[in-house]
Amino acid sequence: MKFTQKRQTFDIVDGVTFAIKSRAVKVTGPRGSLELSFKHMPIDIFFEEGSDERKVVVEKWFTGGKATASIRTCVSHMENAMTGVTKGFEYKMRFVYSHFPINVSITNGAKRVEIRNFLGEKVIRVVDALKDTTVKRSEDVKDEIVLSGNDIDAVSRTCALIQNICAVKNKDIRKFLDGIYVSAKSTVVKD
């Protein structure tokens, strides 16, 4: 069934400003700013009339079925950006090994992760952090790194790159569980 119009609204939290221009959204907050582009989505993004630019409306005309899901996707991206510029995102990753201890060094101004001695291999695995993501060692927990940044996409994709580069090849992965895995997800600013 086709709908003439579907829309979803959300409130902008205090301390955050939005700038909307032709489906390009700039979200600015106390931790910095993020730019999102929704030019590939056939949707309308604007401020609700009479809301003094504190309510954002995302709407889509003549839609139905799965195409309607793009509205909620767009709203979720903007809400994640709001959380990022106010609280930030923090992912914790733990090293898992049975025999050969994984040696991780953080270089290039907390932007590069170098993984050595994975399964006793001599090759050095290198992952560069995306965008504003920073990597540091955990102070209180052994064999743990903490990735933090404002953009949830950049932080989570950096974690995925680190996990994927430590994939065990040509062995039974039920037995060889070595790797670096995400253990916790939270915000930098705790409530």
Image: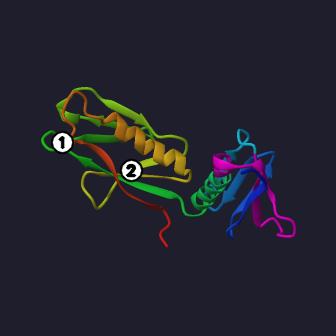
Asked which quadrant contains residue 72, the reply is bottom right
Vertical placement of 60 versus 14: above or below? above
Three-letter residue code for mark 1 = Pro
Q: Is residue 110 visible?
A: no
- Looking at the picture, how far across and down is residue 90, in whole percent? 45, 57
* Between 32 and 18, the one nearer to me in the picture: 18
Mark positioned earlier in the residue sequence (1 or 2): 1
SS for dot 2: strand
| Mark 2: few/some/many CA within 10 Å (<14, 14-19, 20+) | some
Q: Which residues are magenta?
A: 43-69
Please name the residue shown 82% across and 69% down the image: 51
Check if residue 47 falls in the magenta segment.
yes
- Looking at the picture, how far across and down is residue 187, in whole percent? 48, 62
| Mark 1: few/some/many CA within 10 Å (<14, 14-19, 20+) | some
Please name the residue shown 26% across and 26% down the image: 123
Check if residue 55 falls in the magenta segment.
yes
Q: Is residue 168 visible?
A: yes
Marks counted in the figure total: 2
* Foreground disc of the pair 1, 2: 1
Disc 1 from disc 2: Cα separation: 18 Å
The residue under label 1 is 101
* Between 10 and 6, the one nearer to me in the picture: 6
Three-letter residue code for mark 2 = Lys
Please name the residue shown 22% across and 38% down the image: 173
The residue under label 2 is 136
* Between 114 and 55, the one nearer to me in the picture: 55
Please name the residue shown 76% across and 60% down the image: 57
SS for dot 1: loop
Vertical placement of 90 versus 166: above or below? below
Direction from residue 163 to residue 16 in the image, left or right: right
- Looking at the picture, how far across and down is residue 53, in whole percent? 81, 65
